[in-house]
Amino acid sequence: VQLQASGGGLVQAGGSLRLSCAASGRTFSSLTVGWFRQAPGKEREFVAAVNWGGSSTYYVDSLKGRVTISRDNAKNTVYLQMNSLKPEDTAVYYCAAAVYRGLVQAMGSATRYDYWGQGTLVTVSS
């Protein structure tokens, strides 16, 4: 599976961005997909995940209400809508996919994922 993240850029605080994760290769609709982020000098952290069918989602508590993950299996794409962005949201955002098809709430660890994209940089200015 090849994953391509896009949609990052420079945005002012309070603004919005929608990140996309396009997949090719293995049947995308069978995969659980997650987003992670890594700020400079910090460890990679979980942001959100969506199950293979799009019916179940899971978010890190600190971002609930500001981010929404969704998927369009017909387009082999997962989206991360981010609103009310803050400077502390500045990071490289990565999408990842997993063969695992159980509870999406179990997918908060990077070690659960089998495939990773290259990341897209989000910079939020104050």
Image (cartoon, rainbow, N blue to C red):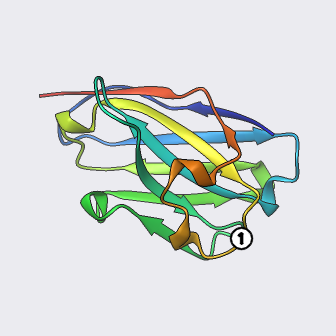
Give residue 56's position: percent from left, percent from top: 57, 75
- Towards the viewer: 110 or 86: 110
- Towards the viewer: 24 or 15: 24
Write the residue at 19% across / 40% down: 86
Kind of residue at badge 1: Gly
Give residue 97's position: percent from left, percent from top: 68, 49
Q: How many marks?
A: 1
Crowdedness near tag 1: few (<14), some (14–19) or many (≥20) residues, C-alpha within 10 Å:
some
Q: Is residue 24 left or right of residue 109?
A: right
Where, by quadrant of the figure, is residue 112 drawn?
Answer: bottom right
Write the residue at 46% across / 57% down: 48
Residue at the disc numbered 1: 53
- Towards the viewer: 87 or 84: 87
Residue 16 lies, with reference to residue 99, above or below; the image says: above
Give residue 14's position: percent from left, percent from top: 19, 42
Q: Is residue 20 left or right of residue 76?
A: left
Write the residue at 20% across / 37% down: 88
Q: Is residue 71 left or right of residue 123?
A: right
Furthest toward the right, the residue is 26
Image quarter hosting the C terminus: top left
Image quarter hosting the N terminus: top right
Q: Is residue 64 left or right of residue 116?
A: left
Furthest toward the front, the residue is 111
Residue 97 lies, with reference to residue 72, above or below; the image says: above
Give residue 25's position: percent from left, percent from top: 87, 40
Q: What secondary structure is marked by label 1?
A: loop
Write the residue at 30% across / 50% down: 83
